[in-house]
Amino acid sequence: MASRLEELYTTLEDKVRDKTHSLDEKNRQLSALYAVTSYLHEANELAVMSRGFIEQLMKLSGADAGSIRPGGQQTGLEPVAQIGLPETLQQADDCQRINGCYCGEAVEQAQAIVHLFRSLPTTREEKSCQQAGFATVAIFHIRANQQNVGLFTLYFRQTTPLAQHDQFLIETLCNHLGVAIENLRLAARDRQFAVSEERNLMAQGLHDSIAQSLSFLNLQVQMLENELPHDLSPQARENLTFIQAGVQECYEDVRELLLNFRTRISKQDFTAAVESLLQRFEAQARVLTQCDIAGNGLPLTPDQQLQVIFILQEALSNVRKHAHAQRVDIRIRNEEDFVMEIADDGCGFDDNLMQVRKNRHVGLSIMQERAARIHANIQFTPRAGSGTIVTLTLPRTERQAA
């Protein structure tokens, strides 16, 4: 009987110890879940939110480095935030291509993947993370609405097999991150729609006031020209022609502004928006255009798309007003950097004179301001032979998943 009681007592101690460990583990998971979700609700920028998420998960898991890369099968993997990765690994090309690294291979997998490099076949080619000195990588999907929106990777210098409950916790936190990223995208889309609605109201006001007044003035000038005597002095008739041309040019400028105000784009129809803009320009300016769009880099964010379209519109407007061009070539390359070139074969410009008049040239200032809003660079250079090249460059450091 005594031995039986002793056995029960020993078993009870083990059960209490196991139960205490289980409760401690659940408390740890709940604390981590609360801390991370609270942080995600407070952060309002993707890069800041991603970096904070990495910091908290590194503390939780004991990892030496971490990275978050939005994207997937169609867009590739471009880091939006990282901590602890050596420069060589950050710049490695195979870390940004699907099937180029362990993370890329995980895109098509349904579950998290933990690679212990010492257990991999020695015949397999080492990836960049192995060459950088890491012994383990743990790769988790970031999901929103059951759709993959990116990857979260933890890097360990030591061989570190993650327990099943730790993997489940990190996967849960990654799902919360996915929801937070999707909320940021929806908020950005709402802001874009709000701006579009405001622009439409402004366009309506312009149409009901300035555009109609200019149209009325244009008609009156034509009627005045018809009523004037045939023996009117050449100087007076020339002045009348100048007035008519000025009114017509103002009317065309306002119509162009109205069309620009009504521009609405999204990442699905960015190319269509560019093509529509060029078709409108050809019809208005009677200038031939040629457009070449290529590259499979990250899609532009809604604000980046909008500013790029407006810069293209302003560049084409300058061609129509000043260049006397016969052809405009537009070349867009969406690679690591996003680069757009607008080259015309017009009369070109005097660089020294442009520098003097730079502050008074509203069109150039508008393009520079729009480029600055998305942290892009814009350059105006003479084209070989004749004409002008406008080059807009959005560097990879400013790229984010749309």
Image (tube, rainbow, N blue to C red):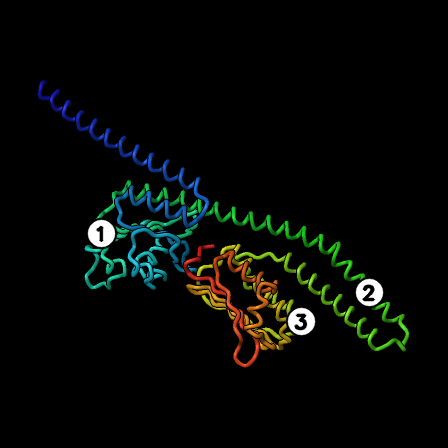
Question: Closer to us: mark 2 or mark 1?
Answer: 2
Q: Quadrant of the N terminus?
A: top left
Decide if residue 192 is on the left or right side of residue 51: right
Q: Residues within 10 Å of mark 1 (few under 14, many from 20)?
A: some
Instruction: Give the Cα separation between the discs numbered 2 and 3.
Output: 21 Å
Q: Tell me the residue that label 3 is attached to.
A: 285
Question: Residue 13: percent from the left, percent from the top?
Answer: 17, 26
**In the image, what residue type sits under mark 1?**
Arg
Q: Tell me the residue that label 1 is attached to.
A: 157
Decide if residue 309 is on the left or right side of residue 115: right
Instruction: Give the Cα separation between the discs numbered 2 and 1.
Output: 78 Å
Which callout, 3 or 1, points at the residue further toward the start of the chain?
Answer: 1
Q: Is mark 2 on a helix, strand or loop?
A: helix
Question: Residue 93: percent from the left, percent from the top?
Answer: 34, 64
* Residue sitting nearer the eye, 60 or 43: 43
Identify the image quadrant of residue 89: bottom left
Confirm whether residue 332 shows in the render: yes
Name the residue rendered at 36%, 62% in the picture: 97
Q: What element carries label 1?
A: loop
Identify the image quadrant of residue 129: bottom left
Decide if residue 287 is on the left or right side of residue 3: right
Counting labels gives 3
Name the residue rendered at 41%, 51% in the picture: 148
Above or below, comparing residue 40 to residue 104 in the picture: above
Question: Residue 306: percent from the left, percent from the top?
Answer: 55, 57
**In the image, what residue type sits under mark 3?**
Ala
Q: Tell me the residue that label 2 is attached to.
A: 219
Question: Closer to us: mark 3 or mark 1?
Answer: 3
Which callout, 2 or 1, points at the residue further toward the start of the chain?
Answer: 1
* Residue sitting nearer the eye, 172 or 44: 44
Confirm or deny contact between disc 2 and disc 1 (CB under 8 A): no
